[in-house]
Image (cartoon, helix red, strand yellow):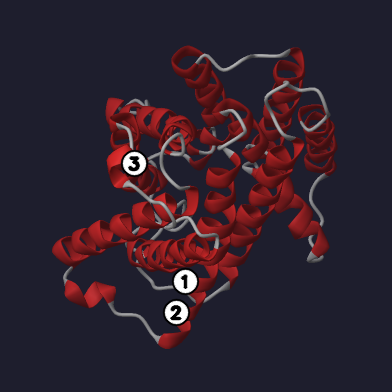
């Protein structure tokens, strides 16, 4: 999960050297966020090759929630896991939006949509957040609104028929819906009463979203004819990678960066992740790079860059 609140709840200045240079540890953590979060789309694509989408996603987040809870209890003490009923309800709501809606639909869509294309469509999340802000009465700068309009044009190119003969439009639209739900969860989270410790909040979000994904998987009948022996080694490894590296290592690096680095630098993950995802999908899975994907993807990434660079100056 991505959060914008330092772990200890206090404002923390960026870590710099005496000459004002950003230390190597910050660049190393940033590289982890770039590569790990950019590679999750590839991991999902490999998982769903032989595993049911919602059941695998549910298992991933429930396991990650247990591991994160254990880390919180070890690092901060068992008391850090306490939460009020209101906080638990808020965490559950955010978990449903982010994990079941946002991540779950992406997992389902990647049974027919290439990982790189999925990442480019999800890159539009900052655009949808701006739209939600505007609908709530906020007035984003003209440059931000321009970025949103340009990004929507990029999405139109990405979702146009004929992107690739093997890509279903329904799968593409499913990823777009996932990005909207993720944006709604991200937009709502700061406005809800969540646990003070962001790691605790994320653990409960993982539990709620993971449990809901399992329920959806059962309702879809994913358990019928389920044969774990038929799961490939690659899918098992990818699921383990998503659980430990994607959900724990990447998240921990991101939260640490929020305390140790300028937000303007940390925010660059929003337009670096899709580039990493496209590159990995092409190199490892031999996913096709069509002109609509290249052009539409470039437009979306550029638009997100404009939005992020404008917003971080406010």
Q: Name the side, left or right, on which 150 lies relative to 186.
A: right
Residue sitting at x 46%, y 37%: 44
Q: Name the disc covering residue 142, or none.
A: none
Where is 51 relative to 11, above or below? above
Residue at horizontal 41 percent and vertical 47 percent from the top: 258
Identify the mark at residue 87; answer none if there is no mark: 2
**Image location of residue 139, percent across then percent down:** 82, 56
Res. 166 image quadrant: top right
Label drawn at residue 91:
1
**Residue 42, how many percent across, how many down?**
46, 30
Q: Nearer the viewer, mark 2 or mark 3?
A: 3
Q: Residue 279's spot in the image, x, y percent?
A: 52, 17
Mark 2–mark 1 Cα distance, whole angstroms, equals 6 Å
Mark 3, residue position: 239
The answer to whether residue 201 shows anywhere in this view is yes
Whether pointer 1 and pointer 3 mark residues with C-beta atoms closer than 8 Å, the reply is no
90 versus 129 height, above or below: below
Tell me the element at label 1: helix
| CB under 8 Å between discs 2 and 1 | yes
Instruction: Please tell me how crowded label 3 is: few (under 14), some (14-19), or many (20+) other residues with Cα within 10 Å.
Output: many
Between the residue at mark 2 and the residue at mark 3, the CA separation in whole angstroms equals 29 Å
Q: Quadrant of residue 234?
A: top left
Q: Position of residue 292 (x, y in %)?
A: 77, 19
> Crowding near pointer 1: few (<14 within 10 Å), some, many (20+)?
many
Q: Is residue 92 above or below residue 165?
A: below
Q: Nearer the viewer, residue 125 or 255?
A: 125
Q: Secondary structure at mark 3?
A: helix
Is tag 2's residue or tag 3's residue first in the polypeptide sequence?
2
């Amino acid at each position: 999960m991505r959060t914008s609140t330092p772990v200890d709840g206090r404002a923390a200045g960026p870590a710099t050297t005496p000459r004002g240079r950003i230390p190597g540890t910050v660049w190393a953590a940033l590289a982890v966020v770039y590569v790990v979060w950019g590679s999750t789309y590839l991991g999902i694509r490999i998982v769903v090759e032989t595993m049911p989408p919602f059941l695998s996603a549910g298992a991933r987040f429930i396991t990650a929630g247990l591991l994160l809870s254990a880390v919180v209890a070890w690092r901060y003490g068992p008391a850090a896991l306490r939460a009020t009923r209101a906080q638990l309800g808020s965490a559950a709501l955010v978990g449903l939006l982010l994990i079941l809606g946002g991540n779950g639909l992406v997992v389902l869509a990647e049974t027919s949509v290439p990982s790189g294309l999925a990442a480019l469509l999800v890159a539009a999340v900052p655009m949808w957040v701006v739209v939600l802000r505007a609908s709530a009465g906020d007035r984003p700068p003209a440059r931000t609104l321009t970025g949103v309009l340009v990004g929507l044009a990029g999405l139109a190119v990405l979702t146009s028929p004929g992107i690739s003969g093997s890509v279903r439009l329904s799968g593409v639209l499913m990823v777009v819906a996932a990005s909207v739900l993720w944006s709604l969860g991200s937009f709502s989270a700061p406005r809800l009463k969540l646990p003070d410790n962001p790691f605790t909040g994320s653990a409960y979000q993982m539990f709620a979203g993971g449990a809901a994904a399992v329920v959806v998987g059962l309702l879809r009948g994913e358990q019928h004819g389920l044969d774990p022996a038929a799961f490939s080694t690659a899918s098992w490894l990818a699921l383990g990678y998503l659980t430990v590296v994607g959900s724990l290592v990447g998240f921990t690096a991101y939260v640490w960066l929020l305390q140790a680095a300028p937000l303007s630098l940390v925010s660059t993950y929003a337009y670096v992740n899709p580039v990493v995802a496209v590159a990995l999908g092409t190199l490892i899975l031999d996913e096709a790079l069509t002109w609509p994907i290249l052009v539409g993807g470039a437009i979306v990434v550029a638009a997100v860059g404009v939005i992020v660079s404008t917003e971080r100056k406010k």
